Image (spheres, rainbow, N blue to C red):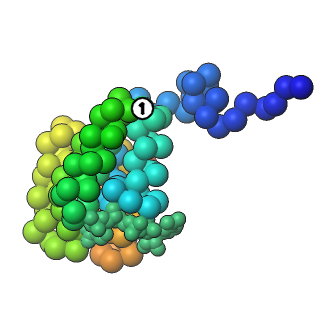
Amino acid sequence: MSHPPSRRDNKVVDGRWSLLGTTALVTGGTKGIGHAIVEELARFGAAVHTCARNEAELETCLKKWEGMKLNVTGSACDVSLPAEREKLKERVASFFHGKLHILESTMWEQQFGRHPQITPLRTTDMS
Ligand SMILES: NC(=O)c1ccc[n+]([C@@H]2O[C@H](COP(=O)([O-])OP(=O)(O)OC[C@H]3O[C@@H](n4cnc5c(N)ncnc54)[C@H](OP(=O)(O)O)[C@@H]3O)[C@@H](O)[C@H]2O)c1
């Protein structure tokens, strides 16, 4: 009996779902929904940068993702602190040469409103 292809099968078989060449910032990527989003975007081929406050947990996740051959980098950052958010923005702009395609933040918009310079799912010049 044949089954319809699963979403995971489609990733491999159907190039329409590829995110190769795109960049993503996912805040809070060491746990919970942020962690799942990091892995999903990276599995689709996106270059992902993530952050969390706990540096040791972040390092553990980065090692795991490296072992999975996923293109994920990370920075320790508390996004509730404006100065740290600015540093994160600078690091992300540097990593991705000023181009961010996807912003996924489970905290950012709730706490700080829409980021004026980043439009999710569209290429944005961060310089
Ligand atoms: N889980 C779900 O299925 C789900 C679904 C829909 C919406 N949400 C919403 O998504 C948010 C996260 O939920 P969760 O269940 O995924 O939480 P969680 O398991 O506690 O994970 C939160 C993540 O965010 C990081 N984080 C928290 N505060 C931070 C800060 N100030 N700066 C940087 N990183 C920070 C945490 O790492 P550190 O502690 O090291 O900073 C961790 O990586 C909540 O607002 C929740 O309502 C969750």
Q: Is 16 in front, or is 51? A: 51
Is residue 119 in view from this perspective? no
Image location (x, y in percent) of residue 1: 89, 25
Q: Is residue 55 left or right of residue 114?
A: left
Q: Which of the four quarters of the rendered structure image does ligand 1 lie in?
A: bottom left
Secondary structure beneath label 1? loop
Residue most extreme to the right:
1
Apparent side of residue 85 relative to residue 122 in the rendered image (left or right): left
Horizontal and vertical percent position of residue 16: 57, 29
Vertical relation: 46 (above or below) 118: above
Query: Which kind of residue does numbered mark 1 sit on?
Result: Gly
Residue for badge 1: 45
At x 18%, y 46%, the residue is 93
Rendering quarter of residue 106: bottom left
Q: Residue at x 44, y 61 (%)?
A: 32
Q: Is residue 3 visible?
A: yes
The residue depicted at 20 percent of the width and 56 percent of the height is 56
Q: From the viewer's perspective, is 54 left or right of 7?
A: left
The percent coordinates of residue 80 (x first, y second) are 22, 74
- Image position of 99 with respect to 33: above or below: above
Q: Residue at x 45, y 51 (%)?
A: 37
